[in-house]
Image (spheres, helix red, strand yellow):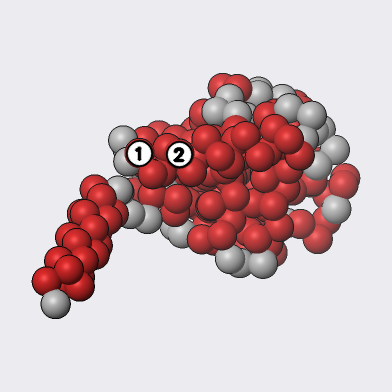
């Protein structure tokens, strides 16, 4: 019976080694932007390399593969499956760590989770890589607006307005951007800018202005 017992002990020993290795691998990092920027274990690095290798076989290059995973990230985001969405945006970033749309995805997921300050950081990263996407400026403005609501610090309201002004320069016919500018200026006692952006919004779509904002504009 010695050999079977020794073999059994050997299997237990191997299981313990494998368990120990698994313990050394940081867990849940695919649910954090950029995998939390933590040091991955050898198994995770090997898995990443295999994923990149397979992606290069399926697509023309890593950039194209990255955009595909961005599209999957948005697909799951709109299904309200934020965990899977984050996994796909992380894969997009892994394939191309300069893809502005991956950072946009990180930012919008964090905003959905009401982690607005973290959201703004990633949206600013996206803007730095591509300053020509009005929608990202709009998302950044939304996050800064929410931070303003939480902290009542006009610094964040001004950041929201700055981002919205950049958004309208890129997409001057987007009524939602003007409406959000009107909402932002409603917090100031001076009503000139508020009335200006209500008028601009009305030229595109009057339904975008909140009736309460219209009431504020009429107050002296």
Judged left or right of residue 97, residue 22 is left
**Tag 1 secondary structure:** helix
Callout 2: 10 Å neighbours few (<14), some, many (20+)? few
Q: Which residue is mark 2?
A: 46
Does residue 24 appear anywhere in the picture?
yes
Q: Position of residue 101 (x, y in %)?
A: 64, 36
- Observer-nearest residue: 47 or 177? 47
The residue that appears at 58% across and 56% down in the rendered structure is 85
Judged left or right of residue 12, residue 138 is right
Q: CA distance from mark 2 to mark 1?
A: 6 Å
Give the total of numbered labels: 2
Callout 1: 10 Å neighbours few (<14), some, many (20+)? few
Q: Position of residue 20 (x, y in %)?
A: 20, 54
**Residue 5 vertical placement versus 116 (above, below):** below
**Residue 151 vertical placement versus 133 (above, below):** below
Q: Position of residue 149 (x, y in %)?
A: 42, 53
- Observer-nearest residue: 27 or 17? 17
**Residue 167 vertical placement versus 219 (above, below):** above
The residue that appears at 64% across and 51% down in the rendered structure is 73
- Extreme residue in the bottom direction: 1
**Residue 220 vertical placement versus 79 (above, below):** above
Q: Which residue is mark 1?
A: 42
Judged left or right of residue 204, residue 95 is left
| Marks 2 and 1 close (CB-CB < 8 Å) | yes
Does residue 198 appear anywhere in the picture?
no
């Amino acid at each position: 019976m010695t050999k079977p017992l020794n073999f059994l002990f050997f299997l237990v020993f191997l299981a313990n080694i494998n368990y120990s290795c698994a313990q050394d691998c940081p867990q849940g990092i695919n649910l954090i932007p950029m995998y939390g920027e933590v040091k991955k274990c050898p198994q995770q690095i090997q898995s990443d390399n295999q994923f990149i290798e397979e992606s290069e076989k399926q697509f023309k290059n890593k950039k194209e593969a990255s955009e595909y995973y961005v599209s999957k990230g948005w697909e799951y985001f709109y299904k309200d499956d934020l965990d899977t969405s984050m996994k796909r945006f992380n894969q997009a970033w892994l394939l191309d760590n300069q893809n502005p749309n991956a950072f946009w995805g990180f930012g919008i997921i964090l905003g959905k989770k009401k982690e607005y300050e973290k959201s703004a950081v990633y949206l600013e990263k996206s803007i730095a890589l591509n300053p020509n996407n009005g929608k990202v400026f709009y998302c950044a403005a939304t996050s800064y607006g929410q931070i303003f609501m939480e902290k009542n610090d006009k610094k964040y309201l001004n950041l929201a307005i700055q981002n919205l002004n950049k958004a309208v320069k890129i997409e001057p016919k987007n009524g939602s951007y003007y409406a959000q500018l009107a909402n932002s200026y409603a917090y100031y006692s001076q009503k000139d800018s508020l009335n200006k952006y209500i008028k601009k919004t009305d030229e595109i779509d009057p339904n975008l202005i909140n009736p309460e904002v219209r009431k504020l504009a009429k107050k002296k």
